[in-house]
Image (cartoon, rainbow, N blue to C red):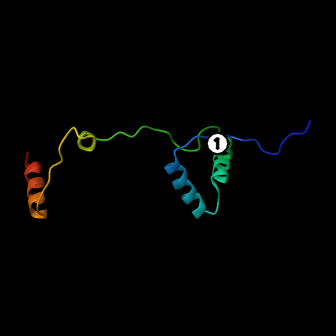
Amino acid sequence: MSMSKTASINVRVDPVTKARAEKIFADFGISVTDAINIFLHKAIMVGGLPFEVRQLHYNATTESAMQEAREIASGKRTARTFHTVNEMAEAFDTDADT
């Protein structure tokens, strides 16, 4: 019985993510397969994921702005519009005072 020198791993990933990763790795002169092998070897060396995994937390102001952006993007809220930069700056100054 002969043993193959490599084993296959099949991974499903969206095409945009794949293309972006391929470009980044190509800039380093490596393939996605090379990058995955580096990841696996590093995981073995450190005995786990080779990077910190944590959930990002933002302050209340940032969370509120992110929620507002989601609502605007989904059409649940109308975005404010301005005709001039000065009009926008005045609105920001007024908002900052409240």
* Mark 1 residue type: Ala
| Camera-nearest residue between 71 and 65 | 71
Left/right of residue 79 with respect to residue 22 in the rendered view: left
Horizontal relation, residue 53 to residue 58: left or right: right
Image quarter where the N terminus lies is top right
What residue sits 8% from the left and 49% below the top? Answer: 97
Residue 31 in picture, x, y percent from top left = 64, 56
Q: Nearer the viewer, residue 22 or 47?
A: 22
**Image coordinates for residue 10, horizontal then vertical, percent:** 65, 40
* Residue that carries the numbered disc 1 in the rendered image: 43
**Residue appearing at x 18%, y 47% in the figure:** 79
Instruction: Name which residue lies at 83% across and 42% down.
Output: 4
Instruction: Give the tally of numbered discs.
Output: 1
Q: Is residue 67 left or right of residue 50?
A: left
**Residue 32 appears at what percent x and percent y?**
62, 52
Q: Residue furthest right?
A: 1
Secondary structure of the residue carrying numbered label 1:
helix
Q: Is residue 4 left or right of residue 83?
A: right
In terms of image quadrants, where is residue 43? top right
Quarter of the image for the C terminus: give it: top left
Task: Count residues near mark 1 (Cα–Cα under 10 Å), then give few for <14, some for 14-19, many for 20+.
Answer: some
Q: Residue at x 66, y 44 (%)?
A: 40
